[in-house]
C-alpha cells in the first residue's frame, strides 16, 4: 500500500529560486528519506531523517519532519538547472525499517 | 552510481525468452534489493537479500526468479514475461537490512517485453 505521497506532482521554477516539496505519509515510521532521480536513471540518496529529529541540513538541502502531522518537506535553496530531476520521499515501517515505501515523486524543472 | 552497477542497461525480449539481469555492488554492503519502477506508478520493492539469504519476496510472480550467489552479486532471472512487465528494474544495496540506512541504487535496466 502506498505510504508516502508527494506534493506538488510537478514544479517549475527559475534558477536561483527556492523549491519546496512536501511528503505526507499514513503510518508511524522509524525514518524518512529523500531521493533524487534523473530521467530514467537510478535513485540517489539525499538525506535521511529519523523520527526523533525535526530538521536536518545538507548543503543546499533542508528537510523537516513533523511526526504529529505525518509530513515532511524538502527545501532546495538557490536552485540550479542541474537540480532538475524527480524527487521522492521514502518511508519505512516500524516493524521493517529496510522496507522502503516510495511516493510517486515531484518532478522539478529548474529553468536557466 | 559506480558503487552499484547493473547490466544490461537496456533489454528487449519476447514473451517466450529467458534472460537475466545482473547487479554488482562494490560498497561492501550486506543487503541487496530489487525494485520495479513502472510508468506512472511508485517504485515497488520486489526482493530483499541479506548475506545471500532472501528475507523478502513481495508477492512477486514466479516468472521473476532472483539469485544471490554472494553478498556482492544479485541476479534477476526472467522467463515468459508479459508486456506489463516492461519497466525500469533497479538494484540497490545497503549496509545491512536490519538497521536504518540509506540505500544505494544502480542505474537500472530498462526492460521492454514485446
Image (spheres, helix red, strand yellow):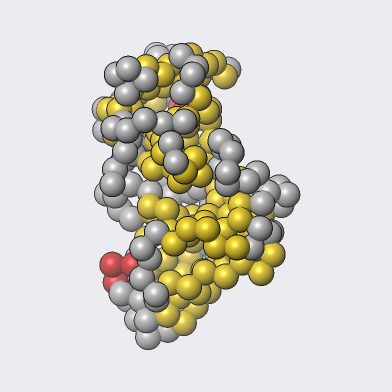
**At 33% from the left edge and 22% from the top edge, which residue is drawn?**
A71
In the rendered image, is residue B6 in sight?
no
Q: Is residue A37 left or right of residue A104?
A: right
Q: Quadrant of residue B16?
A: bottom left
Q: Quadrant of residue B53?
A: bottom right
The image position of residue B56, as x and y in percent, is 47, 58
In the rendered image, is residue A88 in sight?
yes
**At 38% from the left edge and 49% from the top edge, which residue is drawn?**
B43
**For residue B69, above or below residue B72:** below
The image position of residue B109, as x and y in percent, is 49, 61
The C terminus of chain B - image quarter: bottom left
**At 47% from the left edge and 35% from the top edge, which residue is drawn?**
A35
**At 29% from the left edge and 72% from the top edge, which residue is drawn?**
B83
Residue placed most toward the observer, B5 or A23: A23
Number of numbered discs: 0
Residue placed most toward the observer, B87 or B33: B33
- Seen as rendered, the residue at the extreme front is A95
The image position of residue A80, as x and y in percent, is 48, 22
The image position of residue B92, as x and y in percent, is 55, 51
Amino acid at each position: 500500500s502506498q505510504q508516502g505521497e508527494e506534493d506538488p506532482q510537478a514544479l517549475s521554477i527559475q534558477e536561483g529560486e527556492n523549491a519546496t516539496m512536501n511528503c505526507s505519509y499514513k503510518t508511524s515510521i522509524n525514518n524518512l528519506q529523500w531521493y533524487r532521480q534523473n530521467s530514467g536513471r537510478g535513485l540517489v540518496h539525499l538525506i535521511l531523517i529519523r523520527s526523533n529529529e525535526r530538521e536536518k541540513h545538507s548543503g543546499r538541502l533542508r528537510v523537516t519532519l513533523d511526526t504529529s502531522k505525518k509530513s515532511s518537506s524538502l527545501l532546495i535553496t538557490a536552485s540550479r538547472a542541474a537540480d532538475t530531476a524527480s524527487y521522492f520521499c521514502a518511508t519505512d515501517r516500524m516493524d521493517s525499517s529496510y522496507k522502503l515505501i516510495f511516493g510517486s515523486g515531484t518532478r522539478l524543472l529548474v529553468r536557466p | 552510481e559506480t558503487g552499484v552497477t547493473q547490466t544490461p542497461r537496456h533489454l528487449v525480449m519476447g514473451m517466450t525468452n529467458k534472460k537475466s539481469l545482473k547487479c554488482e555492488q562494490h560498497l561492501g554492503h550486506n543487503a541487496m534489493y530489487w525494485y520495479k519502477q513502472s510508468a506512472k506508478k511508485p517504485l515497488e520493492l520486489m526482493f530483499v537479500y541479506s548475506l545471500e539469504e532472501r528475507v523478502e519476496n513481495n508477492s512477486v510472480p514466479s516468472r521473476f526468479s532472483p539469485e544471490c550467489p554472494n553478498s556482492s552479486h544479485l541476479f534477476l532471472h526472467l522467463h515468459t514475461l508479459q508486456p506489463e512487465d516492461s519497466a525500469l528494474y533497479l538494484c540497490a544495496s545497503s549496509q545491512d537490512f536490519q538497521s536504518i540506512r540509506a540505500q544505494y541504487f544502480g542505474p537500472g535496466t530498462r526492460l521492454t517485453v514485446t
